[in-house]
Amino acid sequence: MRLNMLKRALRAGMLCVALAAPAGAQWSTVSEQYYLPASHNWVFRREHPVADRLFNAFDYGHAILYEVFWARPSAPVSVLERDEYEFITRRLLVNPPRLPLEEAAIAPNYSRLAPEAKAMFEWAHLLHRQIYDVLADNRLGEAERDREVARLVSYYRSRPDLAFSTKPKGMSLMEGQPYSLAFRKKYPKFNGLIWAYHWLQVGLYDALLTGKTPDERSTLITAAVARFREMLHDAPRTMPYVMPMTPGVAPVFTQRYPDAAAIFDNLHSMHDVISDILLSDAVPRDKKRAEILLAASRYRDDTTEVITSSEWLGMAAAMGVENQGGPVVGVLTTPPKPTVELGAVMQHDSTRKMDEHAAHRMPADTVARLADTLARAPDDAAARERLVNALFRLLDDPEVQRRVAADSALRRSLHDLLPLIPEEHRDHYRMLVRMPPPSAPRPGGI
Amino acid sequence: MRITLAAPCARGLTVFCLLPFLAIPGTVQGQTDYFNTDRGRPLHVQDAITIEQYAFELQAAPIRWERTPGSFVVWSLEPEIAYGVLPRTQLEIGLPLYVTDGIGDGTRKGVGAVHLSVIHALNVETLGLPALGVHAALSIPAGDFGPRRTYGTLGALVTRTTSLGRIHLNADATGGPAVAPSEPDANPGAAELSRWTLGVAADRTMPLRSLLFGAEVVAAQPFQDDSEVEWRAAAGVRWQVNPYWAFDAGLGRSFGDEHEWSLTFGAARSFGLIRFIPGGRR
């Protein structure tokens, strides 16, 4: 009798454990938090309504993508590549919503699969918007802007369960996992659309920072939005060919607010990672939530795949801004011509080098384009400084130096830039571009 | 039917209703509050989701009109403010104001019970588990239209999302002495309370328009002895008009002897106050 009771109790206990484990894995207590109240709240919406409304539409693109991947795993490719793409580009982006969208209503199934990841995205999107507000607020001086952005980043970081790391991460998190690249290979148009979103989202920071007056800022934002719309004309050919990185597209912002720039690069990488996890057969359906949570924790911590700041900047430069959609602030009057294949992949053993195909051409082509741009835009001191810095970063790469040495035309154009290089850096520059030192004046000579 | 308000009362109400329309320094407004439903705005059944931590939500002009076939008319206004005091936890305080016509002698007006409540969401909905929440409330005597003693209520909230929309289930029970059917006026506020309430609602969102439609059925056991279970049905809409304001409107009907109709309209404004955010000033 007692033995039977014991057996029954044991069975009941085992059943409870078996049921509790999956339930525990489903028990989520992530919580939302209000964003930081400040006088600059909603300034961007007021000052730049066209761009602000576009951002509302962007929320839909991410949400519907995840929802289709999770809720309709056998849906044909045309659901996203044709139907949703056309709806988004012909209707939604033409007449964007007036208000930020509730993602749980667009993606009810995905939102319940990984509410933790959804909350991380929402928290980072709030930071995105609040920094636009700061930079768009014409009442704030430069020091006040810096102080407010620091305050926003600090508030953002006060939620370690939601905040992306401020440390830049290597590409292997995004491109070196078993599930990686599934999305960009199967959905090149929609992937290009997401990258175009990211291009505008980070690029507008440079438009806001580079414009010195309200009118200038509005003009630069209008130009950036026009360039974004241009990307939609002949997708995916006209889209970014690699993931836009903040140091590439918004170098001024990155230099001034490196922590925020790293957060946004990590945010945008994780957007791609979740697409890959949801789509890839390498992750079984019952493991997708766990894989998303694992990826999310890697993007939050300050240890996994962290790269140095110079590696990060070098990686962005090596990828070539022209492959990331081009610069936002008008150093290029025509759309940039990509120099890599659509969806090119970074080599993961060295963040400074591209894959074999790209490594042969990209950095040197980028140098040529930078040199050309620098030669044509010498009046803008800030742009010149940025371009010179980027040029030095590229020229530090031994592979680039080899290419320069082997290309006499490129070498000549780099030599011609010498007058634009600050005096104190010219010796270094001469060495990098293999330029002979200036001849010393003859003693007493004429 | 004619509604009259005494001058001081009218002025007070006007100021209260206009308060949220005025700029409040150091505030920030919400964005998608229409999606987070509140009790009575416009449906009785609410979701198991609380407002964000550190958020305030002011129900600025929640007007309700009820009419029974006997030409009894009740106008009520229950301004309410909620605060996200902890993660997934909100505190609420509300004070209903009533104007009645046809009940007793002519027009009567007064204050109901102070409603103090806390809602805690136990979790966030996942594929395997619905969102679960608990709430506790006190109805504290405050005026002629309130109960004569404090009543406590405990309840549970459940929200389950489907591809078609959300389903919400609310259940609660209130403790305290019953009211004798022969003398409901001896404790008028208690007569408005329910011994228990069970409600189910469904809503569907149009996210690109920031609109939410919902409908509900509620069963309630009145506090009066020997009374029968009342059934009510209602439908309503919530609409986010801009980042600052969400409006709601609803139409309800009770089934049973009274066949009461009700209309409700409200406006909610959510905002944050920097002084209520730890470390926010740094």
Image (spheres, coloured by chain):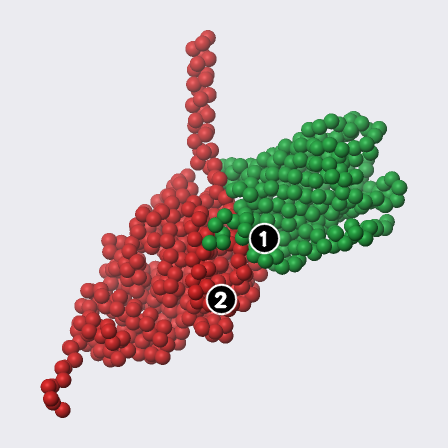
The answer for how far apart the CA atoms under marks 2 and 1 are is 22 Å
Say above or below: B184 vs A36. above
Chain letter belonging to callout 2 = A
Task: Kindly state the secondary structure of the residue where label 1 is placed.
Answer: strand
Taking the spot 79% from the left edge, 52% from the top edge, the residue there is B8
Three-letter amino acid code at disc 2? Leu
Task: Kindly state the secondary structure of the residue where label 2 is placed.
Answer: loop
In the rendered image, the residue lying farthest to the top is A1
B244 relative position to A441: left or right: right
Residue B281 in the image: state x and y as whole percent.
49, 54
Three-letter amino acid code at disc 1? Phe
Q: Which residue lies under the disc numbered 2?
A: A140
Chain B on-screen colour: green
Q: Is residue B137 visible to us here? A: yes
Residue B100 in the image: state x and y as whole percent.
82, 44
Q: Which residue lies under the disc numbered 1?
A: B271
